Amino acid sequence: MNILQETGRILFALPMVIFGVFHFVNTRSLQNVVPSFIPGDTFWVYLTGAALIAAGISILIKKQVAIVCNLLAIMLLTFVLLIHLPSFLNGNTDVLTSVLKDTSLAGGAFVLGRTFK
């Protein structure tokens, strides 16, 4: 990998770790984001936080990057489909940023994972 690819990999991975930490620090506010039809809101917030931290670390240390990036992308797209998009379609235009962020991060994860095949 060249210096730009390495920089991109690190710039992608670090926010994942930070987003994961936010899930543990801001658990109460993130519980409200879990759709009401999914039981165990606290569990999902913690699991998501742990998954984001694990993915970020895996990408940083270059271990299992391809599979981790594909799983991360699927998780992010699941958020778009189950959380952000329904909220947007119900009139909450504030979540459009989250729709676009998670969609673009998923695309980036797919591309990054492909570079490690």
Image (spheres, rainbow, N blue to C red):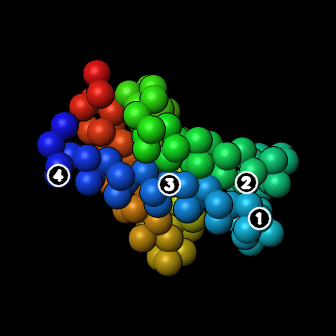
Q: Position of residue 43 (x, y in %)?
A: 81, 47
Mark carried by residue 45: 2
- Sequence-wise, which precedes: disc 4 or disc 1? 4
User: How far, Cα to Cα, is label 1 from label 2?
Assistant: 6 Å
- Sequence-wise, which precedes: disc 3 or disc 2? 3
Number of residues whose C-alpha sits closer than 10 Å to that of mark 2, classed few (under 14), some (14–19) or many (20 or more): many
> Which residue has dot 3 on it?
16
Q: Position of residue 99 (x, y in %)?
A: 43, 61
Q: Is residue 83 above or below residue 90?
A: above
| Residue 62 vs residue 105, the one in the foreground | 62
Q: Position of residue 51 (x, y in %)?
A: 62, 42
> Which residue has dot 1 on it?
27
In the structure shown, which secondary structural element does the residue marked by tag 3 occupy?
A: helix
Tell me the mark number nearer the camera, choosing from 3 and 2. Answer: 3
Q: Which amino acid lies under the numbered mark 3 shown in the image of this protein?
A: Met
Q: Is residue 43 left or right of residue 77?
A: right
- Asked whether the beta carbons under mark 4 and mark 2 sit within 8 Å of each other, the answer is no
Is residue 78 shown to the viewer in this render? no
- Sequence-wise, which precedes: disc 1 or disc 2? 1
> What residue occupies the far bottom of the structure in this picture?
94
- Asked whether the beta carbons under mark 4 and mark 3 sit within 8 Å of each other, the answer is no
Tell me the mark number nearer the camera, choosing from 4 and 1. Answer: 4
